[in-house]
Image (cartoon, grey):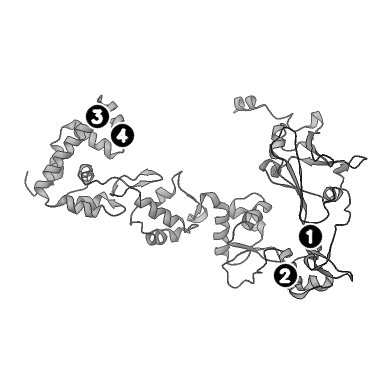
Amino acid sequence: MTRDDDWLQVAFAALPIRSRRMIEDRADGKTLESIGQKHELSRERVRQLLLKAQEYLCAVADEFVGGWRDRLTALTGRSAVPQSEVASVLGVRDQVAVGPLVEAVGAEHPLTWAGRLNGWWTRSSGALEVLIRRGVEEAPLRGEDIAATFAAAGVPDNVPLLDLLGHPDSPLVPGVGGTWLRRRARGRDAAYLFLLANGEPCRAEELLAPTGIGRKSAVAEALRRDERFVQLRLEGKWALTEWPHLHVTPYPNAMEALVAVLTEHGPLHKDALFSRVGERYPVTPWRLHQCLLDDRVGTTADGLIELVARGATPIEESSPTRPARMAADPAGNVFGVRLTVDKDILRGSGVVVSSWVTWQLGMRQAPMVRTFVITGHPTPIVLKRATSAAQISSLRVLVKENGMVEGCEFVLLLRADDSTARIEHVCAERACPRVSRPSGTAERLRR
């Protein structure tokens, strides 16, 4: 062998063909077990043959490249080094025989959520994923921001980022127009990027297509839980809190604004109170009337609105009109609420109902809560009276336990004397949606 030859290529060719095939298999990510099965050898025998081949290649490297171990040790101290750069340090062309040499200094393929990153080396196997996740924390990301974001996080150039980000175990998922969104917040992240590109507030229905969320109420609920978004009053549009040109109220809701006004100004006539609150937190008069039911607010002897903490008498809700889908027994002890199973119930959402039932149960201020126990069921039904509406806690489990499907009709019965509850399926037999649905077995066979 002359020094003008690619010494590593010549050394690799001098190995037995079986050893060369084993080195190639290891470079492809195959395990010792699978290589042994291929060559009808034990796992331990494969390990011995690979070690023997590595020792031979290292001995040849000692002859041709002085100090190569120290140089590779320093090089692979980085989070990820491409094999081509390792080959350059050794003064050879990039090929599979580089692997045993770089492994000899304790380097291995970087570990990521997509598995080992072949073609790259490091002596700190988890360092690369730490850097990539640092870039992921900046999501959502536009396509044009990917390179700069991950470079700022310290990810080496030419790492196959798009392959890693597109892996099923990646914390990000691709969005519209080359964007990348957090897997667990893809709808909200899509809304953020859409508003950022749009530059002005949008209504919830305008965000249905960009977010992929199917219902306007679901969009509003998702954005309401995310501090990046703010809903503007009175128009109800959604905006980004980071936009400096928007006037954003400091109050989380109308009730807090109303309490703040009373705290600052003392007793006020209702019209004056509503006017002052509207200046701070634009909201409809109907909503402000609902706020008067809060147990922190009451009336003075001369009819002004004041805080209960300063001596006002709490205001009770006036009797609402009974809805057609609600009823009570003659003794006024059992109350029935007729409901239809819809997607919200099946999803586990709370059920908004008329405040007639809470008024009948003596829940005439807000907030008030009452629980109803269901025999044989660990979780009670919770009935809440808030300022804006009454709500029953999720009925999803009870509906499913009773075999009901979307479109089924049922009645929720609440007993006032012992605080118990039960539900009854009340569909007409031939009109029940579940009658026309195939059984689970039939459905599977049909598929």
How many numbered marks have been drawn onto this rendered protein structure?
Answer: 4
Q: Contact (CB < 8 A) between labels 2 and 3?
A: no
Quarter of the image for the N terminus: give it. top left
Residue in the image at 23% along x and 30% along y: 46
Disc number for residue 31: 4
Of 311 and 438, the residue lying toward us: 311
**What residue is shown with label 2?**
260
Q: Earlier in the sequence, mark 4 or mark 1?
A: 4
Direction left: furthest residue: 2
Q: Earlier in the sequence, mark 2 or mark 4?
A: 4
For badge 2, the amino acid type reads: Ala
**What residue is shown with label 1?**
295
Report x, y in % for residue 270: 84, 70
Q: Contact (CB < 8 A) between labels 2 and 1?
A: no
Distance from Cα at disc 3 to Cα at disc 4 = 12 Å
Give the label, 2 or 3, closer to the camera. Answer: 2
Disc number for residue 44: 3
Of 14 and 182, the residue lying toward us: 182
